[in-house]
Every structure is written in structure tokens, then in C-alpha cells.
Amino acid sequence: MIFGIHSLLFTETFLDKDLILLDKFQRMGFDAVEIIPFDPDRFPAARVRQAAASLGLTINTGYGMPEEYNIISPDASVRRRGIDFSKRLIDLSNEAGAKVFGGMIYCGWGYLSGRMRTAEEWKWGVEGYQEIAAYASQCSGLVLGIEPVNRFESHFINVASDAVKFIQAVGFPNVKVHLDTFHMIREEDDMIRAVLETGSNIGYIHACENQRGIPGRGMVPWRAFFGALGQVGYDGCVTIESFDPDMPKIAKLCCIWRKLADSPEQLASEGLAFLKRIQAEALAAA
């Protein structure tokens, strides 16, 4: 198992000027970095790959798909744009050397139809993702992570069991479930059972407190969570995801209205130390 940090805790997008952050994250003790290429035209993918390789860092990428790229839209032209934009993000992820491209990458982030998911939406989502997954299969080793999110951000996939059904319907081995403890604690009946039942379908983990603060200072049952990851044999990346309220665009998107730590550095470093300790304890108890 390796531990990563989300770049959005430190910068609103990732441009050439932000490459220096990779060195900072490596010195803080992280094995991996997740980057969101919010500005695809200016994302320095090749330089990210080069810098990460020189530092021994794993790169992951993610995205929250805007509604204009929503592949479950009733508008076929919007669905088509979503598929094409997904392919562009996959190209950037591959150029950056990413191992995982995950998140709200299967429908519009924040898109709420006002009713429960329909059979038509499921059909559109599966068909769209089959084309996306086939395209991504040309990228050596790139995993697409389907992240269940809470009911306030989507009505489409809220729990791990639905994500498993979705990836099984898509039917490509490069599509996995991306679990996020922030969303799980809101939506799952039993977080630990969800991990155990998702099992080998898990491809990526976001480690977030229930309030997005420092891991260990909230309500997430971390010892049981890491114990369950050990039981299913997960040995991939666990990334701390949080955001800085001093970044107005991200704060508004993610509804962060108060300080969750004295600094991003504190949240990252204390969170990493806590998660490493808990994971070691879970291994010792296994």
C-alpha cells in the first residue's frame, strides 16, 4: 500500500509553476500525488511525468465532469461531448504517466435530475463508458476509477454496490471502484461491509474525514476500514483528499466554509502520520 496527497489541497489547478510541489510532497513522505487537470490546455503532462519519475512518485489523476460533458444527459450531443472530453483527459493522464484516472468521471458532477436514477440513464452511462474504457485500454496499466459520491453531488451512483454493478455492466477490466470515505460515511449502511463486498473490484481509495479535516479527528472508523482493506488484499494507493477554504473556486465547489487545519501542510503531514500508523496496526493485528 502506498500513500498519496491530493494537489487541490495546495493549488487550484496544476500548471508549470506548480511542478515544484511534487518535490515538496516527496519530502513530506508521500509516495503518490493526485492531480486534477482543471485547465487541460495548460496542464504540463509530460513535465509531470518527468518530474515524478525523477522523484520516485506515482501520479494519479482525477476529475469532476462538468454538466456540459454529462454522459447520462438526455441530450445525445452532450453525451457525445462527454465521451470525447473523457478521451482527452485519458490522453493527458497517460501522457502524465498516471496509474489511476478516477473521480466523478462517469456523469456530470452536481447533476441532479430531481428523481431516482432511471433505466435510460443507466443505459447511457454504461454505453458511454464502454467506449471510454475501450479507448483507455490502449493506455498501458491505466485504471479508470468509478467513485460513488453523496446524494448532494449526484443521484446516479451513491454506494459501492452500485459502482460494482456499473463496472460489471461496462465489462472492461481496466474499470474499478474508487472508494472515498467522505462519501461512504454519508451513504453506506455499513462502511466496512461495503469494503469487504467490493473486494477485488477496489482500484483506488480517497482517505477523507467525515468533515474533510485531518484524518483521525473525525468519525471515520479508520482501524476497521484498514482492517477490511487488508482482508480483501488491497495494496494500491490511499490518497488524502481535502481542500483549502482560502482557495475561493475550490471552496465553493466543495463547500468548504471553515478552516480544517492550521495549514495545508499540517493536514497533510498529520494525516499521513496517522494513516500510516493505523495501517501498521491493522497489519499487526491481521
Image: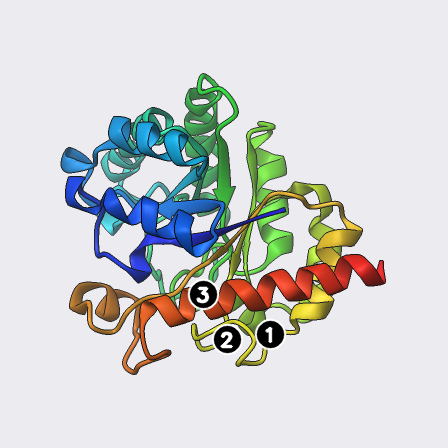
Badge 1: residue crowd in 10 Å (few <14, some 14–19, many ≥20): many
- Circle 2/circle 1 CB separation < 8 Å: yes
**Circle 2 residues within 10 Å: few <14, some 14–19, many ≥20:** some
Q: State the residue in front, 180 or 51.
A: 51
Q: Quadrant of residue 201?
A: top right
Residue 36 place in picture, x, y as percent: 30, 46
Depth check, mark 3 against mark 2: the one in front is: 3
Q: At x 60% / y 52%, what residue is drawn? A: 162
Q: Is residue 194 left or right of residue 27?
A: right
Above/below status of 22 relative to 130:
below
**Amino acid carrying mark 3 in the image:** Ser
For mark 1, what is the residue? 220
Pointer 3 with pointer 2, Cβ within 8 A: no
Q: Quadrant of residue 187?
A: bottom right
Residue 194: give x, y in percent of width and height.
Answer: 69, 60
The number of callouts visible is 3
Residue situated furthest right in the rendering: 286
Disc 1 or 3, which lies upstream in sequence? 1
Q: Is residue 285 left or right of residue 41?
A: right
Q: On the image, numbered disc 2 is attached to which residue?
A: 210
Name the kind of residue labelled 1 in the image.
Answer: Val
What residue appears at the point 65 percent right and 54 percent down from the top-left corner? 161
Q: Are marks 1 and 3 in contact (CB under 8 Å)?
A: no
Label number found at residue 269: 3
The answer for how far apart the CA atoms under marks 3 and 2 are is 18 Å
